[in-house]
Image (tube, rainbow, N blue to C red):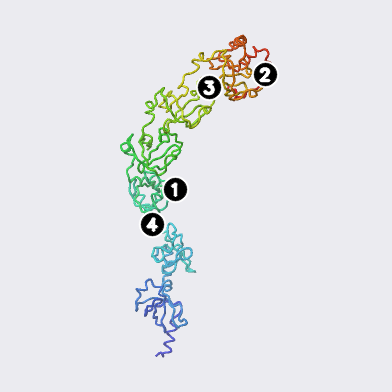
Amino acid sequence: MLTMEEAMLQCETSFAEGQIVTGTIIEVRPKEVLVDIGYKSEGSVPASEFEDIKEVKVSDKVSVLIERLEDREGMVILSKEKAEMKENWDKILTICNEGGIINGKVKAVVKGGLLVNIGVEAFLPASQVDVIPPRNLSTFVGNNYDFKVVKINQERQNIVLSRRELIEQERNERRSKLLSEMMPGDIRKGTVKNITDFGAFIDLNGLDGLLHITDMSWGRMGHPSEMVSLGQDIDVVVLDINRERERVSLGLKQKMANPWEQIETKYAIGTKVQGRVVNLVPYGAFVELEPGVEGLVHVTELSWTKRIAKPSDVLKLEEVISAVVLGINREEQKISLGIRQLETNPWDEAQDKYPINGTIKGRIRNLTSYGAFVELEDGLDRMIHVSDISWTRKINHPSEVIKKGEEVEAMVLEIDRENQRISLGIKQLSQDPWSNIDNFYKVGDLVTGKVTKLASFGAFIGLEHDIDGLVHISQVSEEHIDKIKNVLNVDQEVTARVIKIDKGERRIGLSIKAANYSNEQIEAEQAMLDSLKPGEDLVALQHAFEAVDTTEEGTETETETPSEKEEE
């Protein structure tokens, strides 16, 4: 019979560190569980090694691994997890060799991935967690999943898992099934997987389809994110399937009727409509009448009278405006709109408001080299051509007689409704003095007037009846004159004799030096002047005068500039 000492010795020798034994739970504490393994002292197992400490009960049996027979307090240190790991190792090796699948619980986040308990601790790389690597791995902690064992190191007892391979395998199976069953026109549920500038990729539960931006809405869109968001569940229409390349085209707008189908009925020509300005371009403004239906207001259709350089001068983005439908092209999905048609075209009333030969008053709005623009009413400008300002004066620029902002009176000469033009004239308000020139001036008459302009070839003298006469430099004095400005000044009053009247060219030749000539001298010069060809420039009078006056030495030596020649 064994003595007490021998029994204790035998008990001690039957337990060893690293040994797996079965024990009975004798007490459950918040941080540890006490287990009786038949040793001289109880063993302690960390409470964290139990899946749910609340379900652990006294008298439950549990397999544990002896890590240390006695610690400083004489307590046996036990591990439930290490016992399970050691017991499961052979099973894990069998599964790995067969490429099998095993279930496990994610235990914690570690560097580069997750730690998984599959009976033993295994490593799940972050790249193998899902098809798309998750941003937050902590969301997987505490969850159970199926894993495929992809690598094992028996010596180091290291196992690498993959959840992604199982997901991809399952997706491939679903993809094949979807491709075989799916037909154009089907409506399928999906989840927005990715958004790009040109569209969104939709996960159809195993098969990705492209929802192009042009198939999202019948209306205008700047970016797909205006319609969908990541993770959003949506119903889409299958538009096209390429089974060989496993590509599917999807649509959203096809779930609704095409607004252009009955466009002519809804927006008949001449109809007044309202819409929102969605885009401004140099040539016009695009107006959204409803989602998917836009019309263009061309810049020329903004106003009857105002010259609008660009639509942004009068319209703003997002502004709600009224317009009139001018034209519809359903095939090209285009609608022409007009804003000016909301008002009466002032040109329709121009003929009645401004009758031909009638007189008007208006303010000079602008001056150009060829005429002056008169504002008859808001935005209605009409032109007085430079040739219709004076019967008698040679006007190089309207600013010589008219100032900007000045109010003038003029006669309506012509109305061109198609080209939106009204021609006005100032000189037509009075009679052409040249029609009665014989009643006003005759050759030999002595006249008085003021110098209005100087040129290298002579001076212009303002006479009565708004007529200018020309005194050539050779006709100023019996003596030779180098420069006209040496003897005459603008606004200087002079007396001269009429020596030439050219009705065809509407010109009068004067001579200051002939003011004191006798009738015989005038007749002699007149004979020479009459020898000039009709219409010949009055500058040529110099040669005629020199031929009569034998005392004149030489010819005019001063060179005329292009501008001076033009003034002549």
Identify the image quadrant of the C terminus: top right
Which of the two marks, 1 or 2, is nearer to us in this view? Answer: 2
Which of the two marks, 1 or 3, is nearer to us in this view? Answer: 3
Check residue 480 in the rendering and tell me which mark sits there, or answer none.
2
Give the mark, 2 or 4, whose residue is nearer the N terminus.
Answer: 4
Tell me if label 1 and label 4 are in contact, CB under 8 Å: no
Question: What is the C-alpha distance between the residues marked 2 and 4?
Answer: 116 Å
Which of the two marks, 2 or 4, is nearer to us in this view? Answer: 2
The amino acid marked with disc number 1 is: Asp
Q: Provide the secondary structure element on which disc 3 rests.
A: loop
Tell me if label 2 and label 4 are in contact, CB under 8 Å: no
The amino acid marked with disc number 3 is: Arg
Question: What is the C-alpha distance between the residues marked 3 and 4?
Answer: 98 Å
The amino acid marked with disc number 4 is: Glu
Q: Mark 3 points at which residue?
A: 393
Q: Camera-side residue: 224 or 476?
A: 476
Q: Where residue 335 appears, x then y in whole percent?
A: 37, 37
Q: Is residue 61 above or below residue 456?
A: below
The amino acid marked with disc number 2 is: His
Q: Where residue 521 appears, x then y in whole percent?
A: 62, 10
Give the mark, 1 or 2, whose residue is nearer the N terminus.
Answer: 1
Asked if one can make out residue 566 in the rendered structure from this viewpoint, the answer is no
